[in-house]
């Protein structure tokens, strides 16, 4: 089940450094790409920083719409994340080609990718100088959701769910680590 | 054993989204803080983006020296990471108080924290407008090293080492996930 995440807790969806999917739409075009370079930028209102290469098709959609969505994929989706990260929307409609579904979420203004475990809908904070120089985009999170099976009451709880719902951490070349064991930093 | 990491592969030390320690020194002062908001920004030359709150003591050292080091801590250090993230260098000399050792590495221009599994020595790329508005700092990596026990030939291999050398992914309040199982994104 997908439920809204309180905005003051939305940073926790990204705080552990998962690889994400960035998606955007403009007019009749939409696209999604894999992105390991995404992080929280502020707590409340929640903001994020993401790197979107200038050669990606998604980049144009983000710039034109002024918006993007972040979907947090899980181990079950590792192959599709790799495909979205190694093929370009300049070549094909990736969502159609890989039969990727978009959630029916009326509050979302950019496509949320089905099968993921968390989602953040965002509006760009325009900083043209760093967008141009470093492909770095800042955005404010306007809505967030998570699958209660692995995130509820502001906490991830992968240990009580199937391992296929753990989030992904890309290293290089389609090789990932799953999010692992809980560690208590007070002991 | 600590060995240099080829600069073109240095992004792989951060690509999986670990929580890191940021350290800096200026004059006779030095400090380290925990930071979950750090990510690669470019491949080669490698660059990084990190968020350094304006209230931290480290922030002043980074701004004054124009440099910072990123140390990637491991599960064995979870308690010290939490202490470095919940206490301020404004109150005390944290490195002395927690008996944290700095590596004797002649090439490093900022303190590298002992016991970690990877290190990136960096020089700031000054962007005063985003430093002021968003506490966001960009830097170029000038040298990188890793412990061969868990990183060699451009790859992490946590599975063949003790679990206490896995990297950490902070969620909130001193709760972390360890880096988990390898996932092949081509299957």
Image (cartoon, coloured by chain):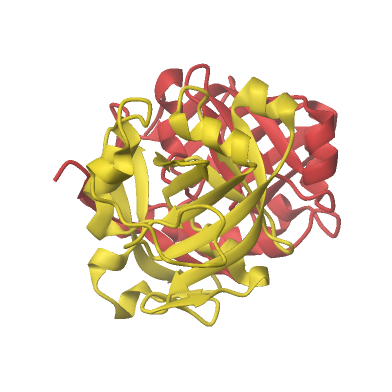
Chain colours: A yellow, B red
Where in the figure is residue B12, as x and y percent of width and height? 40, 34
Percent of width and height locating residue A6: 62, 75
**Above or below — where is A160 with respect to B65?**
below
Looking at the image, residue B90 lies above or below residue A160: above
Where residue B75 appears, as percent x and y from the top left, is 43, 59
Relative side of B54 to A76, left or right:
right
- Residue A8 visible in the picture: yes
What is the residue that sits farthest to the front in this orientation? Answer: A28
Q: Residue at x 26, y 54 (%)?
A: A77
> Which residue is situated farthest in the left direction here?
B187
Q: Is residue B110 visible in the rendered structure shown here?
A: no
Q: Residue B184, percent across and down?
A: 19, 45
Residue A66 located left or right of residue A165: right
Residue pictured at 43% horizontal, 49% vertical:
A20
The N terminus of chain A lies in which quarter of the figure?
A: bottom left
Q: Nearer the viewer, residue B133 or A144?
A: A144
Front position in the image: B166 or A157: A157
User: Quarter-wise, where is residue B24 in the image?
Assistant: top right
Q: From the viewer's perspective, tell me whether residue B175 is left or right of residue B35.
A: left
Counting every numbered tag in the picture gives 0
């Amino acid at each position: 089940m997908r439920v809204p995440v309180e905005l003051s807790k939305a940073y926790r969806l990204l705080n552990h450094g998962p690889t994400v999917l960035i998606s955007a739409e403009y007019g009749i075009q939409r696209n999604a790409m894999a992105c390991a370079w995404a992080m929280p930028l502020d707590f409340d209102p929640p903001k994020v920083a993401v790197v979107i290469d200038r050669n990606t098709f998604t980049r144009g959609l983000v710039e034109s719409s002024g918006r993007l969505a972040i979907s947090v994929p899980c181990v079950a989706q590792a192959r599709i994340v790799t495909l979205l990260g190694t093929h370009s929307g300049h070549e094909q409609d990736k969502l159609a080609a890989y039969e990727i579904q978009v959630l029916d979420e009326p509050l979302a203004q950019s496509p949320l990718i089905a099968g993921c475990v968390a989602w953040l809908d965002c509006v760009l904070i325009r900083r043209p100088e760093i967008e141009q120089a470093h492909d770095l985009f800042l955005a404010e999170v306007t809505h967030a959701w998570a699958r209660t099976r692995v995130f509820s009451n502001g906490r991830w709880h992968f240990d009580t769910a199937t391992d296929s719902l753990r989030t992904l951490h890309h290293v290089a070349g389609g090789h990932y680590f799953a999010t692992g064991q809980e560690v208590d930093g007070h002991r």
